[in-house]
Image (cartoon, rainbow, N blue to C red):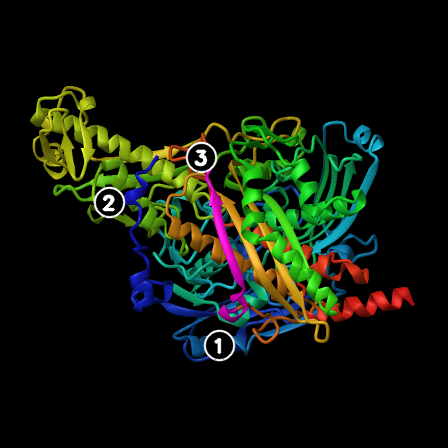
Amino acid sequence: MPDTDRWAPARIEDAPLVSGMGRFLDDVDPLPGTLVAAVVRATQPHARLVSVDLSRARAHPGVAAVIGPDEVREALRPFPLSTGAAMPYLPTGTDKVRFVGEPIAVVVASDRYTAEDAAELVAVDYEPLDAVVGARAALAPDAPLLHEDAASNVATDRTFSFGGVDEVFADAVHVVEGEYEFPRYSSVPMECFSVIAQWNDEADGPGVEAWANFHGPFTMVPVMAGALGVPTSKVRLHVPADIGGSFGIKAGIYPYVVLMALASKHSGTPVRWTEDRVEHLLASSSGADRVMRFAAAVSDDGTVAGLKVDLVDNVGAYLRPPEPSTLYRCFGNITGPYTIGAVEIRARAVVTNEMPTGLNRGFGGQQLYFGLERLMDAVAGATGLDVLEVRRRNLIHAFPYETPTGGVYDSGDYPAALELAEKNADMDELRARQSQARADGAHYGIGVALVTDPSGTNIGYVGLATPAQDRKPGRDKSGSTEHVRISVDLQGRVTVLLGSVPQGQGHATVARQVAADRLGLPVEQVRVVVDMDTATTPWTVTSGSYSSRFAPVVTSAVVQAADRISATVRAAASTMLGAAPDELELVDGTVRAPSGESVQFRHAAGVVHWDPGALPEGTSARLYEEAAFTPREVRAATMDDKINSSLCYGFVAEIVAVRIDPDTLEITIDRVSSVHDAGTVLNQQLLDGQVYGALAHALGGAMYEEFTYAESGQPTSATFLDYLCPTSAETGYELRTDHVVSPSPLTPLGAKGSGEGSSMSFPVAFANAVADALAPHGIEIDRLPLHGEVLHQLFETTSKEIS
C-alpha cells in the first residue's frame, strides 16, 4: 500500500491549463501545407439522396478538393460492426441520409472561411421519407425502415435467463413492476471534435497519419483501418496532451478521421477539420436514451429474490462502434448491490432518425440504476417498508460475491457505507425539514440510491450481443489490459510513458506519485508523458480513458514496470554496496543496504548506462521496462452467457434532499450526502474532484440536459439556448462527501475506479427525492430530466386523471 503521507502533491496538470499554456489540437500544427475542411450536412432526418451536385463547390476559388457520396462509396468500406445487423455504416450518407447533421460531403480549401462558403454551393436533392423518432416508434410493426436490408429497426435483440426466474416469480408474495425512461444527453466538452489527417502513398501501400482529440478505446484503430482498407499498422494516430474534455463522447471520433483521410487523399495535402458547437450538438454523439421495464419478485419481508429486466436502447441512426456497449457494460452488475439470485434480461438496441450514440460518463450504469433504484422505491411502497430499510435488507454482506450473471464483486462493506451516508445526511434533521415543509404547504422529498460501481471494464461483454452458438471458436474477446513504459536516463531521471489518454483526471499526477513511491524517489525526479502516438506509445486495443480504468488498471501496470526497474537498480547498486540485491531498499532517492550504507539512485542507474560489464551475471543492462497489467479475472463470456464484465466493483451510497416551490414548482437541491468506496484512495484531492465532477455531470442529465426531436425528426436542442448545461450557479447546494476503504485484492495498490460513481447514482437519487416530495399528490416519476415545466405537466396530467 502506498505511503499516504507522501501522497499530497498538487496536480501537475493545472498550471499550463490555467495559464493558457495547454496543448490542445488547435495548438498543434504538425504538417506544412495543411488545408482546412468544412462538412456539408444533411438537413433532412430521413431522405433518399436523389443527387449531390459538387460542381459549383469544386469551381470555387481556393478549393482544393470536394468529396461526396460517390468518392466515399468507391474508396471506403463500411465500418466493422459488433453485430451482424444488415445496417452498414459509412462516414457519410451514400444512398440516403438518416439523421439531420449526417455528413454528405467535405470541402477542402485554403482556409475555413473559403471552405464554408464553398460548402454552401453543394446542391443536394432529397426525396423525403417518413422519420422514426424514439425507441417505441422504432419498435412499431409498421415503422419505416432506416436500413432496407434489415428486417426491422432492431439492431440487436438477445434474451438471457439465470437462476430459475419463472419459479421465483411464481412463488413471490409481491410482483412489483415499473416502466422507466432515461434521457439522451452528452458530456459537452470544452473543445469539440478536431482532426488533422494525411493520406500517405508509400512503396509498401497507402497509410494514414492523423492527429485527433480522441480518447479511446483503441478498439477504434482496427475499425478505422478496416474502413480505409489498410492494415492496422498503417494507421498512425496522435493524441495531444490536452483534449479539451470528453468523458466518452470522443470515443466515437473515428468517422471523421476516416473522412478527413479520404479528403486528404483527394486534395493531395494534409487536411484539418474542427467541429463547431452547433455541429457538435447536432451530429457528434450522445449517450443512449433507454426505455426499460423492470419487475421484482418480492417476499413478505421485502427481500427481492428475482428480477426481470427489458432494456431498449435508442442508438440513433447507426449501431456505431463501440455500441452496443451501453447495453452490456453493466451486465455483470445488473443486480446492483443486492443479493438477487434469479435474473431475466432482454436487451435490444434500435435505430432511429437521430444522432448516433456512444459512450457517456457512467454509460450503461446511468440507465440501469435509474430503473433499478426507482424499482427499489416501488418495492418499499409495496411492502410498507422505509426506502432505506428495504435496501438494507437486500444488501450484499460477504465478499467476494458472484452475481447470477457472472460478475464477481471483489470487496466492499456496503452496510458501513450506507450507515455513513445516513449519518452525514443527518436523516432526522431532513425528516424534520420535510415535516415542516409539508405543514407549510410546500413539497420536500428525500431520495436514496445505492449503486455498485464497476471499473476496469472487460471488453468481452460486447460478445454477449452475439449468441453463444454463433461466436467463432478462438475469436473471443476479453480483457482490461494496459501497457506502461518506464525508463531511467543517465542522470537517474525517470520517465513514465502512458497510453491512457487522460481528459483532465490527473493521470500524470498519480502515475508520478506511484512511480516515485515504488522507486523511493522524490516526485520531482519523475516525469510523465501522456501524449499518445500509436506508433511509439505502448498500447493495446483496450487502452484509453474509459470505464474508470486508470486507478485499478493503469496504476497496476505502473507498479509492475517500476518494480522491474527497481530490481535492475538494486542489482546495479549491489556491485557498489557489497550486498545482495534483495537486501537493498530504495528510499529517499538512495539505494540503502542493511548496514545503513547507501548510494544515490542516480549513481546506481549510472552503472547500467556507463559500466554494464560490472553488473551481476544475468542482469540485463536496460533501464526501460514495459509492463502489461492483464488481470486473469476478466475473461470472455461463457457459453451460458455469464461474464465478469469489470475487474473491480466499488460502491456509492447517495442521499439527496430537494425542496419544490409550491407556486412555481422550481426544484432546489437542499442537501447531498455522497459516500464512495473506491478501494485504496490514491489521491484524496483527485478522488474528491472526480466525485464533484460526476455530480455536476449527473445534475445535467437529472435537471437540464436532453437532446430532443420533433416528431418529424428535426432536432429541437441544437444550440445552448435549448440544450441547457448546469453551471457553478446550479451546484451551490450543501454537499457532504465521504468515503470508506475496502481495498481490492485484485490490484497491487488495492485501488478501484471512482470517476463515474455519482454520474450513475445521483440522477436516480434526485428522481427518488422528487418522487418522495410529490407522493402525497399521487404523482409518479418515471423519467428525466425533471424541472418546473415537467412538474407542471405532471400535475396537470394527474389532475385530469383524477377528475
Query: Is the residue under label 2 in contact with that under label 1 (CB below 8 Å)?
Result: no
Q: Is residue 740 magenta?
A: yes
Secondary structure of residue under mark 2: strand
Q: Nearer the viewer, mark 2 or mark 3?
A: 3
Distance CA(mark 1)–CA(mark 2):
43 Å
Give residue 743's mark.
3
Residue at x 37%, y 54% (from the top left corner): 239
Distance CA(mark 2)–CA(mark 3):
28 Å
Which span of residues is magenta-colored? 727-741
- The answer to which of 163 and 503 lies nearer the viewer is 163
Figure check: 584 above or below 551: above
Q: Is residue 354 visible?
A: no
Secondary structure of residue under mark 1: helix
Residue 320 rendering spot, x and y as whole percentages: 59, 51
Q: Nearer the viewer, mark 1 or mark 3?
A: 3
Say which label, 1 or 2, has the lower sequence index: 1
Quarter the N terminus occupies: top left
Figure check: 226 above or below 360: above
Secondary structure of residue under mark 3: loop
Q: Residues within 10 Å of mark 2 (few under 14, many from 20)?
A: some
Q: Amino acid at mark 2?
A: Thr
Q: Amino acid at mark 3?
A: Pro
The residue carrying mark 2 is: 495
The residue carrying mark 1 is: 116
Residue lying at the far right of the rendered structure:
803
Say which label, 2 or 3, has the lower sequence index: 2
Q: Is residue 33 left or right of residue 42?
A: left
Q: Residues within 10 Å of mark 1 (few under 14, many from 20)?
A: many
Q: Is residue 662 magenta?
A: no
Q: Amino acid at mark 1?
A: Glu
Distance CA(mark 1)–CA(mark 3):
54 Å
- The answer to which of 245 and 94 lies nearer the viewer is 245
